[in-house]
């Protein structure tokens, strides 16, 4: 079950954290994985190949519409198609509303929301011929909110709206579009949080522990599989019960 043999998958923000776990999980299920990131890094691809998988890297800024579109179209032309797109690239610039700058808002939305739009727009053109899967990485705070994350939570909430609209627009072309909304996950981003904040988050999580990137990746794998072919426009919550 949940095999992706022969599928071509692009994962943005694939150089570390949840993105890296997604690349490894999809590759382990048989997909050819393109680990895309703004940073030049081969660490994820090295891990993929060491595990017996196949793939490549791609370097572009998702917030640059021309670069994102050109790169994804070139991948589709060279490899024949794109079957899976995981919009995982994102940033969090945390501030209370009165301290949020216009630049913070613009940068957050440019990457978290517009980047997903640009990548989806390019990928859907090839998916319309063969069908496909798009998975957008949202967040528990998109639905629950969180003090100090005005820009981040609103950008991720908008991503859920995008997910539901694209699901309706392209269902007739056999393209499913879903979102995964992680809670408190063990990544570089959460490792930087003060201990008192971590403890507070854990107290709000019924399962009482931090999540693993691999647990988020497992949800992505399911949504990308044939077994999830009748699921679209949904938000899968991987949050330990923090928000239900």
Image (tube, rainbow, N blue to C red):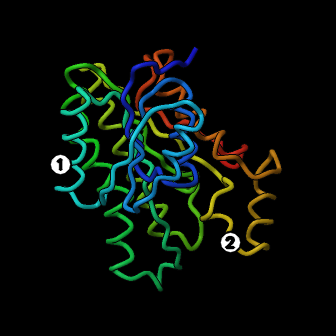
Residue in the picture at 37% in, 37% down = 85
Residue 64 on image: x %, y %: 23, 61
Residue in the picture at 64% in, 46% down = 213
Left or right: 137 as drawn, with respect to 125: right
Determine whether the residue tagged by mark 2 lies in a helix, strand or loop.
loop
Residue 242 on image: x %, y %: 70, 49
In the displayed structure, 57 sits above or below 195; it is: above
**Mark 1 — residue?**
70
Classify residue 155 by image quadrant: bottom left
Q: Where residue 138 is drawn, which disc sits there?
A: none
Classify residue 197 by image quadrant: bottom right
Residue contact between numbered discs 2 and 1, judged by CB atoms under 8 Å: no
**Foreground residue, 134 or 82?**
82
Q: Is residue 92 visible?
A: yes
Q: Quadrant of the C terminus?
A: top right
In the displayed structure, 164 sits above or below 171; it is: below
Q: Where residue 193 is drawn, which disc sits there?
A: 2
Residue in the picture at 31% in, 63% down = 110
Left or right: 120 as drawn, with respect to 228: left
Real-space CA distance between mark 2 and mark 1, rounded to the nearest whole angstrom: 36 Å
**Foreground residue, 96 or 192?**
192
Left or right: 59 as drawn, with respect to 31: left
| Residue lying farthest to the bottom in this orientation | 99
Residue 31 on image: x %, y %: 45, 27
Q: Is residue 160 visible?
A: no
Classify residue 200 by image quadrant: bottom right
């Amino acid at each position: 079950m949940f095999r992706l043999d022969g599928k071509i998958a692009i994962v943005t923000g694939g150089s570390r954290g949840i993105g890296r776990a997604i690349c490894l999980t999809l590759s382990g299920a048989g997909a050819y994985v393109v680990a895309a990131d703004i940073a030049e890094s081969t660490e994820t691809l090295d891990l993929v190949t060491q595990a017996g998988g196949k793939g490549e890297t791609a370097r572009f800024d998702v917030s640059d519409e021309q670069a994102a579109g050109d790169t994804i179209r070139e991948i589709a032309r060279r490899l024949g198609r794109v079957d899976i797109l995981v919009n995982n690239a994102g940033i969090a610039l945390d501030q209370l509303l009165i301290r949020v700058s216009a630049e913070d808002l613009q940068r957050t939305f440019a990457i978290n929301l517009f980047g997903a739009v640009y990548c989806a727009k390019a990928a859907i053109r090839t998916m319309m011929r063969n069908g496909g899967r798009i998975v957008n990485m949202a967040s528990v705070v998109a639905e629950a909110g969180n003090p100090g994350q005005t820009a981040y939570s609103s950008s991720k909430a908008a991503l859920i709206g995008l997910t539901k609209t694209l699901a309706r627009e392209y269902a007739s072309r056999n393209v499913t579009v879903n979102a995964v909304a992680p809670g408190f996950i063990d990544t570089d981003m959460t490792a930087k949080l003060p201990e008192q904040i971590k403890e507070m988050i854990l107290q709000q999580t019924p399962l009482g522990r931090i999540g693993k990137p691999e647990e988020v990746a497992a949800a992505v794998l399911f949504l990308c599989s044939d077994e999830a072919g009748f699921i679209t426009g949904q938000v899968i919550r991987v949050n330990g019960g923090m928000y239900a």
